Amino acid sequence: AHDIELHIHNLTQAYNAMAVNDLQSKCTMINWSSYMNSLLSAGSEVVPVVHSETEVIVLHEKALEQVCDIVHEYTSNDEKKSILERYVLLGLARSMKPFFDLTTFQPDVNHDEEMEAEGEHWRRCIFYTNKALGLATAAVYVNATTIDASLAQITTLVTYVKRAFKEYLLRKIWMDAKTRGNAEKKLDEMIEKVSYPSFILNNTFLSEFYTNFTIGDNWFNNLLNWRRITITNMVNSLSKPFDRLN
C-alpha cells in the first residue's frame, strides 16, 4: 500500500490532522481509541488519554485506507488471517533485532563477522545504556570533567556569533520590512543550548525521572521496561505545553 499521488519527501502534504472519530470512519480495521489507549498505558492500568475528539496526525492517509482494505480482506478469511498474524509478529521481532547479537537471528554468522558488523559487545552495552539512561550518564560525565571552566567563554562566543549574524542579515541581505522583522524576531527567539542542562545534576530529579524504570539481569525485560518508561514520559507530556527551554 502506498500513496502514488504523494511524493515521499513532501512531508507537508503527508501531515494530516484529524479527530479520532474521523479516523475511525475512514479506517475501521481496529478500534483506534482502544488501541491508542492500550498502547499509551504501556502495560499499566489503562487510563484513557485518547477520546473520540482527540486530534491525531495521520501520515499518508490514502495509503492507510489501502492498508485498512487489505486487513479487512485478510481478516475475513481464516487462512489469510493467520498470515496477517504472523506478519504482525514478524514486525515485532524485527523491531527488536538491533538490540540483540547478530547470531540471535542469523545463527550461521561467525564471531569475526559479528564483530565487523556490530563491534565489540562492551561498546554496544555502553551505547544502549547511554540511550536508555542518557540524563544519568550525562550527569556522570559532567561530574567527572572540568567542563564548567570554559562554559562562560563558550556562551559568550555563541552570543557574539548570533549578534554578528543578526547584524549581517539585517544589513547585507535584501528583505522587505515585514520579512526583516520576522527574521529579527526569529533570531531573538533562538535559545542557546550550550553544554548541558543544569537539571541533570539534580539527584532528586533523576530519581523521580527514572523511578519506574526497573533494570535487572534479563536483557529482553530491560528493553521492554525501557520502552514502557519512554512511552510513559511521552504520555505525561501530551497534555502539557511544549517547553522549548528544557
Image (cartoon, rainbow, N blue to C red):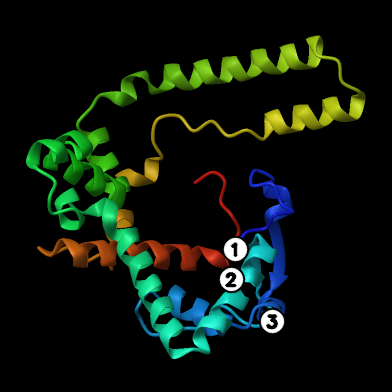
Q: For the residues marked 3 and 2, what is the alpha-carbon distance in whole angstroms?
A: 18 Å
Can residue 204 be seen in the rendering of this structure?
Answer: yes
Question: Residue at image x 41%, y 40%?
Answer: 197
**In the figure, 101 relative to 112: above or below?**
below
Residue drawn at x 51%, y 82% as measured from the top left: 74
Instruction: Classify mark 3: residues with Cα within 10 Å, few (<14), some (14-19) or many (20+).
Output: some
Q: Which mark is residue 21?
A: 3
Relative depth, front residue between 83 and 154: 83
Q: Which residue is mark 2?
A: 67
Q: Position of residue 6 (x, y in %)?
A: 71, 52
Q: Position of residue 88 (x, y in %)?
A: 40, 72
Query: Quick one: SS at disc 2?
Result: helix
Q: Image check: 56 left or right of 236? A: right
Name the disc covering residue 1, or none. Answer: 1
Q: Nearer the viewer, residue 201 or 14?
A: 14
In the rendered image of this protein, does residue 46 appear above or below residue 106?
Answer: below
Q: Amino acid at mark 2?
A: Val
> Which residue type carries mark 3?
Asn
Q: Are marks 3 and 1 in contact (CB under 8 Å)?
A: no
Q: Looking at the picture, how far across and down is residue 243, in whole percent?
A: 56, 51
**Element under disc 1:** loop
Give yes or no for contact between labels 2 and 1 (Cβ–Cβ under 8 Å).
yes
The residues bearing labels 2 and 1 have C-alpha atoms spaced at a distance of 6 Å
Horizontally, residue 102 falls left or right of residue 170, namely left
* Residue 118, above or below 179: below
Q: How many marks?
A: 3
Q: Please state, as top left, top right, bottom left or bottom right, where the N terminus lies in the image.
A: bottom right
Residue drawn 74% across and 54% down?
5
Mark 3 element type: helix
First along the sequence among labels 3 and 2: 3
Type of amino acid under label 1: Ala
